[in-house]
Image (cartoon, rainbow, N blue to C red):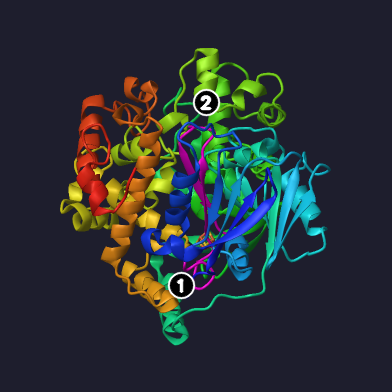
Amino acid sequence: MFGYAGKILFVDLSTRLIKTIPTDKYAADFLGGRGIATKIAYDLIPPDADALDPENVLVMMTGPLTGVAPSSSRIDIVSLSPVTNLLGGSSAGGDFGAALKFAGYDGIVITGRSKEPTCIRIIDDEVTFHDAEACWEYDVYDTVDCVKKLGREDVQVACIGKAGANLVKTAGISFSKRNLAARGGLGAVMGSKNLKAIAVAGTKGVKVRDTKRLMEVNFEIQKRIRESPAFKKYENWHANIALSLLKARRPYFGDYEEDYWEEAEEAVRNAKRFFEEMATLRPNSCFSCPLRCWAWVEYKDEEAPMVACQGTFPAILFILKIKDPELAWKVYLRLQREGMDIMGTAAVIAYASRLGLVKLGTEDILWLIDEIVNREGPGNVLAEGVKRASEHFGVPAVYVKGGMESWSSDVRPFRGVALAGAVSESGSISRAIHGFPASSYYTKPEKAKKVAREIVGDESAAEPTNYKGKAKLVAYFENEHIIADSLGVCDTPMLSIPLELWAEAFTAATGIEMSPEKLHFYAEKIRTLERMFNVRRGVNREEDTLSPRLFESVIRSGPWKGVKLDREKFERMKDEYYKLRGWDERGIPTEETLRKYELEW
Ligand code: SF4
């Protein structure tokens, strides 16, 4: 196989049996990355399994472009999510995906549960298990250092911190201290399998079909990425991202108990000063990415990576209402060292503030993070996520599909974002519709309108509070995200470069003819399979929703004062979305749709 490594590694932790399966068993039907990972999860995870059962399966898959194209750093992770107990998924950049392919594997499938804490080390064809008892409670920084001492300093490491080991539902999987597969609690799945880390190093490279053509296409993609005005902001990104979120009217503050935080701009100014005058920044990038969108930030002998496009630092400022940049830094560092989903954990802490357990904007936050990581005191309930905590405490919370914590924006005025948060199988809005035009409507109105004109044929569809055309926009951007996740390319640069070029890169790498239309067909098929996974677990239209608080409350202050999410109009958006996807009024794929995509229950 060209473009692909050619085989997928299966590791059963219960029996320690290891085998490989040829990737071409799946590639023609499910492309790669998220597509193949979803198919393996669909085939192997029993419909009645719980996310923390040994029967759950953790699939990490690269795509056919991982390691061979610009910005091709991605690895996609699919499993049952302990947050929602539905299909979960997240992806990460860095160097792990490329290293895995260079070791000769397109992906790793982890089944079963190890009796003892363990670490898997993959050096080309050699796969070994190592005792991880001593480092089981380490944070991710110390775990990476510990794993590198096993004999190879050059390994790339996927691991969990103490939060993952303690099955905290907002624990992610960290990749070599830098990149985090944050959403959906997949770190807790690793913890439930007694799997502390996977280390990989490879020397094999990847064979491609047409090297000359691939180099030409790659050169063109790189040139466009470098020249794209969309990426100029990364030249001075740090606090500017927070500023642009404010301008875009997107953040929410606390736990929606206040609709506008008057001190938000002051918090951003302080953060800007922190990055410009107090901390040291060393820009960096993931494997083969010309964008350098993230940097190592160093302050008082401690360092942490910050990725510009994720909005995680702004989430700490806004959701936790932190004006003091040194405190914001300490909170960020603590969560990063534990490999925790920053948006999810911030939402949990903001919810705890409604219960009077913590005062936002204060050092109390650091105490509560420790309580959650260690599952002590109220932290033991909060470690279960906002939905379960709200059931325990009897105080309503804000969440999206299946109990997933929302993202950094108030979803009520953003109708498309609200729809995406309800219909997305994983509940992760950022996995569904990164680049959605309504997100930038107030910062780049002409661009947002142009996108709406091209996709819906009506530029008014870009206006955030308009319900019209949102279903079509959501379906379109979901497809684009699935394509990026399945090819193994980072969605940030992918969305700014014409899809034709990525299709050409695929053809040059694999020798298989590809087009934007075919890529969209694959995305629709993969999306349908994701839906089938959840339908098999009992999901239908009733589960495609948001927490009641989001429909019941009217925004009381700030730029969105008076705005409300209308349940009837929201349900009509769902009808439109189901129709576009070929699902019936209950949200179940029709027989005709299954035939179209050659899928079977
Ligand atoms: S855009 Fe940023 S996150 Fe994406 S691959 Fe490039 S450096 Fe990594």
Work out whether residue 260 or residue 540 is closer to the camera in this orientation and state it.
540
Number of the front mark, 2 or 1: 2
Magenta segment's dominant SS is loop
Look at mark 1 in the image and give the residue it sits on: 226
Q: Is residue 549 above or below residue 559?
A: above
* Label 2 element class: helix
Position of 505 compared to 137: left or right? left
- Residue 74: image x %, image y %? 52, 60
Residue lying at the far bottom of the rendered structure = 212
**Which circle marks residue 386 in the picture?**
2
Residue found at x 31% / y 46%: 438
- Residue 253: image x %, image y %? 48, 31
* Residue 368 placement: quadrant: top right
- Residue 358: image x %, image y %? 63, 22
Q: Write the start and end of the magenta stretch as one range.
A: 64-93
Work out whether residue 458 or residue 428 is closer to the camera in this orientation and state it.
428
Work out whether residue 12 or residue 155 is closer to the camera in this orientation and state it.
12
* Residue 382 placement: quadrant: top right
